[in-house]
Amino acid sequence: MSIKQEVERRRTFAIISHPDAGKTTLTEKLLLFAGAIQIAGSVKARKASRHASSDWMEIEKQRGISVASSVMQMEYRDCVINLLDTPGHQDFSEDTYRVLTAVDAALMVIDAGNGVEPQTIRLLQVCRARNTPIITFINKLDREVREPLDLLSEIEGHLGMDAVPFSWPVGMGRSFGGVFDIRRNRMRVFRAGQERRDNHDELIEGLDNPAISARFGDMFEKARDEIELIQAAAPAFDHKAFLAGKQTPVFFGSAINNFGVQEVLDALVDLAPQPGPREALQRPVQPDEPKFSGVVFKVQANMDPAHRDRVAFVRVSSGRFQRGMKLRVSRTGKEIRPNNVVSFLSQRRELLDEAYAGDVIGIPNHGVLQLGDVLTEGEQLQFTGLPFFAPELFQAVEVKDPLRTKQLRIGLTQLGEEGAIQVFRPEVAGGALLLGAVGQLQFEVVAHRLKTEYGVDARLMPSRYNMARWFTADDPKVLRKFMDSNVANIAYDVVDAPAFLASSPAQLRVAQELFPDIVFHTMREHGGQVFAGNA
């Protein structure tokens, strides 16, 4: 096949949701229905004998939550699907944001009992800012949940886009009968079943089929009235509006019971876009260009604890990747020849020989690649939009055993480079390292990983700081004077970008008044060279 034909086969999307909406379960079931796994794992019980394929970190298995993004590739209906499962917990929103820069569509999972929740709204704002197409799956219809019309109205109100139902539930909870496929004019009858795929679904044709009415009675009559109402009132599905992020197709089901998963998987193939052009500072990069380019959107340390590895996740932006090809790192100018590049089914890996635009590949390395690095066959390119946000919580970190100080610094450097936490090194010599986070759970995860992955028992202590701002100035002399005047409040992050640490908004305001030529930033992009979000 040509590069263009290979690109057209690709679908790359992220699954997003509020915690506990069933996102990781749905991820597992998509793998099951695509034939990538034979038995789905459970993400519920701590003592379960199997865990979800997308939850590989030890703390995830203990708590039954996802705290790291994971990547899975599978083939379905002659399409290559790259599925990125994101952390649902709001404390890991930075990781999710960066993942969303690497995908072409999003699958939003909504708990039918809770509706649109705060974390979902935040993630949707990110998608809307990038005009990312969104497919919606309303989950947990096997429970007593909210009315589907109310859920549709809430989606439209909160997300500011038209919700177009592709299916409609018949009943809920114990009386859940199934879903009616509006576009194919048939009902798929619900039958509980968890771990293995069952190919013997019962289908009943026709909205006016008396057999459905006889079997499901008032439940179906109510569903039929609602379907006729939305068919008359709701806008018709417009694929261009969907691709522009102005419409979302809506599906109902129960992921834990494998129900409604097939329709979502088919929608991803039929509706989600193939890889498109990516904006670089130098020029737009087309996916079917002959030469390879890609960007590191995630770095993960110790996916295989036995080998202390670090894997850079690269979204291929253009061309064809071939194992052993010579690549240039735009940030440093270094050349690498990656020979052990892998594709993923979560922590299970396979060596790959080639990849195309839209694919996500893993390049094991020892610190050569950082978040935001661009790999090309020689051209100097810099892709934009991979952010780090100013942390809102701080803790100082020390090691309980002074002999493990070196391991502490190695661990924190690697965890900082992968974006798990932000690490600040004080300008004042001898000062304790500072950890900056968006949410409290990040500190717990980092302490756990330092202990289990690096053998470091760390002590986390309160810090007097509660805000950080990166800063720049046009005049280097002004920059130097500011830093000399505030030496006790200056620290460097993992890429040596200087930041001003403040204990209160008032302290920041005073610094702004005393140094009007210094620009303070709430966000920096990769490498420390591009700043945004003035404060």
Image (cartoon, rainbow, N blue to C red):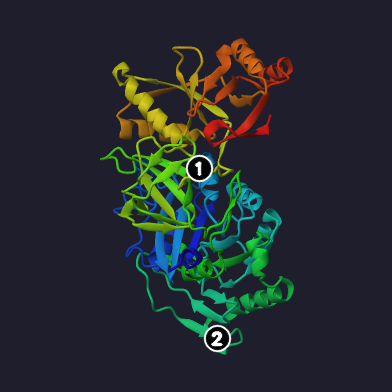
The residue type indicated by label 1 comes to: Asp
Examine the image and state in which quarter residue 258 appears: bottom left
Q: Residue at x 37, y 52 (%)?
A: 346
Q: How packed is label 2: few (under 14 Cα within 10 Å), some, or many (20 or more)?
A: few
Per the image, label 1 sits on a secondary structure element best described as helix
Q: Where's residue 447, x and y in %? A: 39, 30
Choose mark 2 or mark 1, whichever is in front.
1
Q: Nearer the viewer, residue 119 or 306?
A: 306
User: Which numbered marker is on residue 95?
Assistant: 1
Relative vertical location of residue 136 with respect to residue 309 in this rendering, above or below = below
Relative vertical location of residue 278 with respect to residue 370 in this rendering, above or below = below
Q: Where's residue 310, x and y in %? A: 36, 40
Cα separation, mark 2 vs mark 1, equals 50 Å
Q: Where's residue 357, x and y in %? A: 48, 57
Residue 327 placement, left or right of 14: left
For the N terminus, give its image quadrant: bottom left
Q: Where's residue 510, x and y in %? A: 70, 16
Q: Determine if residue 86 is in view.
A: no
Q: How packed is label 1: few (under 14 Cα within 10 Å), some, or many (20 or more)?
A: many
Relative vertical location of residue 375 with respect to residue 355 in this rendering, above or below = above
Relative vertical location of residue 534 with respect to residue 204 in this rendering, above or below = above
Q: Determine if residue 459 is in view.
A: yes
For the C terminus, give its image quadrant: top right
Contact, CB < 8 Å: mark 2 with mark 1?
no
Label whose residue precedes the other's in the sequence (2 or 1): 1
Which residue is labeled 2 in the image? 214
Examine the image and state in which quarter residue 407 appears: top left
Per the image, label 2 sits on a secondary structure element best described as helix
